Image (cartoon, rainbow, N blue to C red):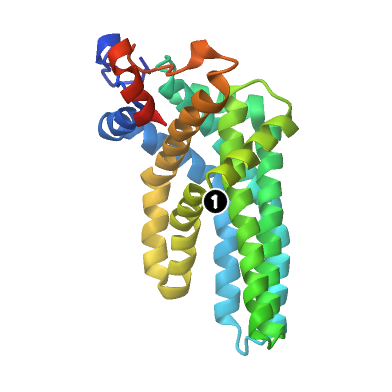
């Protein structure tokens, strides 16, 4: 079983969860320190990005006469700075997915050791994935500000914001799936990225929900209340960021079983879960899928 310094864990395989839904509940209930430590490590790598984002908001708010050109310039140059900082954040997320894969597989390890081992192993791939996402965020941000500020046609505004938000949503989901895929299989970067996009598009309703919860809600709170945003950011920094990695990891593993492992890697099906009886196999497949 996964090991934590100072924590007693269950070593009996008979006590393993039977489904990934049960595993999710088990980790949330029993492994608070796993989610907290992973979240805090992600927060450390995200401080530069958060700093620029906060500076961007403050500059727009503090402008004496915030005309359209000024707001666009602030968003444009801050967006350029944020691109490599997204890469820095995703180095940490890459490593976090490796830690959660170990936990999902019921394999031993210490969080810090596994995390920084993952940073060393996958920093370049994580950085590239983050920079791709940062570039899309830059396009979304600058295009949205541009059509709102410099175009009076409502249809063009709606189409411009809608198209760039859709692109942002898909790339965001694809980046998360990519991290799960690349930590699971030995694939070329382009192969793992292709799989990430495939899963994000195939399961678009879930991609939409994930985007709304992890990106839409914080962005909405930015517009409504600074204190609400700070509260949500604190929850993510202390626990929630680790939870998102856990949730995507477990859901991704169920997709891998369904689309990949069932054909190519049958020994990996339901890895980390309790051995299933033939009589309950069909039911558990439904629960995991």
Q: Position of residue 133 (x, y in %)?
A: 66, 50
Residue 6 lies in quadrant = top left
In depth, the one of 246 and 236 nearer the eye is 246
**90 versus 107 height, above or below:** below
Q: Quadrant of the C terminus?
A: top left
* Residue 150 visible in the snapshot: yes
SS for dot 1: helix
Residue at 36% of width from left, 51% of height from top? 235
Q: Position of residue 18 (x, y in %)?
A: 30, 21
> In the displayed structure, does residue 187 sit left or right of residue 287?
right
Tell me the residue that label 1 is attached to. 47
* Residue 91 visible in the snapshot: no
**51 versus 84 height, above or below:** below
In depth, the one of 272 and 203 nearer the eye is 203
Residue at 64% of width from left, 34% of height from top? 195
**81 versus 199 height, above or below:** below
Q: How many marks?
A: 1
Residue at 32% of width from left, 30% of height from top? 27
In depth, the one of 280 and 80 nearer the eye is 280
Q: Position of residue 225 (x, y in %)?
A: 40, 72
Residue at 26% of width from left, 10% of height from top? 14
Residue 152 lies in quadrant = bottom right
Q: Position of residue 38 (x, y in %)?
A: 44, 35
Few, some or many residues within 10 Å of mark 1 (<14, 14–19, 20+) = some
> In the displayed structure, does residue 228 sit left or right of residue 266?
left
Q: Quadrant of the N terminus?
A: top left
């Amino acid at each position: 079983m996964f090991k934590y310094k100072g924590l007693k864990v269950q070593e009996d395989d008979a006590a393993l969860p039977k489904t990934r839904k049960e595993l999710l509940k088990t980790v949330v209930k029993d492994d608070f320190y796993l989610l907290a430590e992973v979240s805090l490590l992600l927060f450390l790598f995200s401080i530069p990005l958060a700093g620029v984002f906060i500076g961007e908001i403050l500059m727009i708010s503090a402008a004496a006469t915030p005309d359209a050109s000024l707001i666009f310039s602030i968003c444009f140059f801050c967006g350029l700075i944020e691109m490599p900082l997204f890469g820095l954040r995703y180095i940490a997320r890459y490593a976090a997915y490796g830690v959660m894969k170990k936990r999902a597989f019921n394999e031993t390890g210490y969080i810090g050791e596994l995390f920084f081992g993952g940073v060393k192993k996958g920093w370049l791939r994580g950085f590239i994935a983050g920079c791709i996402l940062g570039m899309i965020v830059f396009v979304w941000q600058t295009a949205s500000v541009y059509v709102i500020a410099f175009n009076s046609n409502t249809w063009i505004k709606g189409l411009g914001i809608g198209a760039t938000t859709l692109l942002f949503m898909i790339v965001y989901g694809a980046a998360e799936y990519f991290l799960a895929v690349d930590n699971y299989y030995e694939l070329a970067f382009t192969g793992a990225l292709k799989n990430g996009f495939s899963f994000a598009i195939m399961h678009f309703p879930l991609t939409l929900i994930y985007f709304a919860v992890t990106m839409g809600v914080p962005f909405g709170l930015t517009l409504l209340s600074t204190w609400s945003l700070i509260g949500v950011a604190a929850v993510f920094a202390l626990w929630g960021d680790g939870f998102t990695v856990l949730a995507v990891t477990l859901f991704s593993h169920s997709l891998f079983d369904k689309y990949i492992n069932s054909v190519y890697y049958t020994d990996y099906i339901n890895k980390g879960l309790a051995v299933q009886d033939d009589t309950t196999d069909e039911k558990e497949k439904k629960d995991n899928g």
